Image: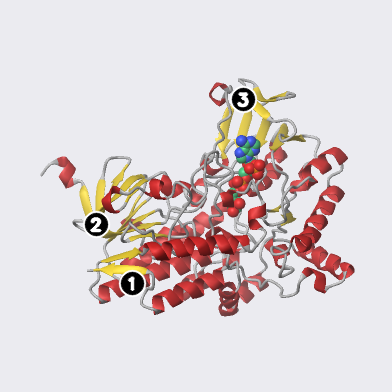
Amino acid sequence: MTDAARRVAEFDALIIGAGFSGLYQLYSLRDRLGLSVQVLEAGEGVGGTWYWNRYPGARCDSESHSYCYTFSRELLEEWQWTERYPGDAEIRRYLDHVADRFDLRRDIRFGTRVSSAHYDAATNRWRVTTDKGDQFTAQFLVTAVGCLSTANVPNIPGLEHFAGRWFHTGQWPHEGVDFTGKRVGQIGTGSTGIQAAPVIAETAAHLTVFQRTANYSVPARNAPLTDEFQRWAKEHFDEVRQVMHSTTNGHPFAIDRRCVFDVTPEERAQIYEAAWQKGGLQFRATFHDLLLSKASNDTAADFIRHKIRSIVKDPVTAEKLADIDHPYAAKRPPIDTDYFETFNRANVSLVDVRADPIEAITPLGIRTRAAEYPLDLIVFATGFDAMTGPLLRMDIRGRDGLTLAELWKAGPRNYLGLQVAGFPNLFTITGPGSPSVLCNMPVAIEQHVEWITDCIAHMRSHGLTRVEAETEAMDGWVAEVNAAANATLLPQAHHSWYLGANVPGKPRVFMPYAGGMARYRKICTEVAAKGYQGFAFGS
Ligand code: NA7
């Protein structure tokens, strides 16, 4: 046997990624269905997104009691979150615990990045090659690669000549970065930048925030969880899950049914103020029509702009921060801890790079059209090649050598966000075309993993070996995803990563399914109940 032949390992299923999705998919296929499964993971540990995102202030925007698996009652009972929103280290501890508790590590190969996955019709198997040249084959291939795992470092001329150090928030060094006494430049004011700036400013000599698009943000009001709340969350978990499953976005709070103009301006102001004081993404849930009507949305947008102006003392800085060009929540709405307050510090300044664009990075720092900012460190909080990026950076080829990159060159196409015509037995967890990033992620992930597991169980019990989305069903779903987005204000944020607008050259297509998680779950359940309508099986 040659070395090459010896290194081809065969499994029933291969899973790419060991974050929330990959861990649960491994457990489901291995322990529920009895398949032989191998997970391939680029990191040296479990955690996925949370393995890489260790930047200062990294924290989840979902409340901790809802940011977890619900499939195991014992797991729910034994795990204790400590804060209202879990920080990155606590989420890693949780996922480490899950991996140990369900004995998952023995089937995960760490430090292994998948470079290609090719379908072989003759054997009905996927052949997967890694960056180390190892090869694996399997009947089923499941991508659990996350939506925000391909870092987007903008191509600014001169970066290679910068004399200081630079980091992307999504590839943060595990040993941390010491900002003490340093002049730091931060590019980007999305959810990440809004979390990072206040923490960096605490120790940096000076922080300069380079803002291209001003952003709304609502206080998170993070705090330690009381014993009383922890008890309540455990005792009422069935009700909490019921709410998470019935709402549009999978969070443990319902979106109010009232519309903005159902109430008087005074009542509206009180409702917004109460939500601002309570903090968190609930602000978006105050009215039913915030993302449906521009006039309604304007009232929330004006409320937040007014808050920004009242918090930020320097009127010029306040105006730059409040000069927001899109409807509230049409981009992913950040929540923060003292973001706007940070601009009242003497060691923090804001540069509006729309008015004064970045021209180059020099050995000394960042040069805009009007000035040069000397820096020791640059933090790129510049986001990700979201949703399609993690899939397309692998060379995925289906039937007859068709590449995913070719099929998706004008934007992602799939059926239910789960399968692509021409790519049999390939399943994508929380890929484009599914609610994913518009939803509390673990809710979306559990639904996908369970649907995929049920589909494979169905195949095995019916002697079927191949499943593939039909082209017509795929085209119908692409139209449905577009229609769902166009029924909302979401496409009106022209710079949003939902649209791929943050990555030069990326097709501008609204990627996630905006029809709501509850509706999506119903569609998927009905499709399965009708004998997997829109999918073709082979044996
Ligand atoms: P985002 O939300 O994509 O934010 C990236 C930020 O970086 C945003 O303010 C961008 O401005 C800015 N950016 C990107 N490229 C550049 C260049 N070339 N010059 C200046 N500024 C730039 O990423 P995050 O990491 O904050 O959040 C991602 C998701 O993680 C978040 O939505 C949550 O779901 C969790 P722009 O708005 O494009 O003008």
Secondary structure beneath dot 1 equals helix
- Real-space CA distance between mark 1 and mark 3, rounded to the nearest whole angstrom: 53 Å
Asked if the residue at label 3 sits under 8 Å from ligand 1, the reply is no
Asked if the residue at label 2 sits under 8 Å from ligand 1, the reply is no
Q: Amino acid at mark 1?
A: Arg
In the rendered view, would you say 370 is above or below 324?
above
- The numbered mark, 3 or 2, whose residue comes first in the sequence reads 2
Find disc 2 in the rendering and name its residue: 125
- Real-space CA distance between mark 3 and mark 2, rounded to the nearest whole angstrom: 47 Å
Outermost residue toward the right?
A: 266
Q: Is residue 98 left or right of residue 373?
A: left
Secondary structure beneath dot 3 equals strand
- Real-space CA distance between mark 2 and mark 1, rounded to the nearest whole angstrom: 22 Å
Find disc 3 in the rendering and name its residue: 361
Q: Amino acid at mark 2?
A: Arg
Residue 32: give its label.
Answer: 1
Evaluate whether residue 246 shows in this view: yes
Q: Quadrant of the C terminus?
A: bottom left
Packing grade of label 1 (10 A; few <14, some 14-19, many >=20) is few
The answer to which image quadrant residue 373 occupies is top right
Cβ atoms at labels 1 and 3 below 8 Å apart: no
- The numbered mark, 1 or 3, whose residue comes first in the sequence reads 1
Q: Residue at x 33, y 66 (%)?
A: 29
Evaluate whether residue 24 shows in this view: no
Q: Is residue 327 left or right of residue 512?
A: right
Secondary structure beneath dot 2 equals strand
Q: Quadrant of the N terminus?
A: top left
Asked if the residue at label 1 sits under 8 Å from ligand 1, the reply is no
Cβ atoms at labels 3 and 2 below 8 Å apart: no
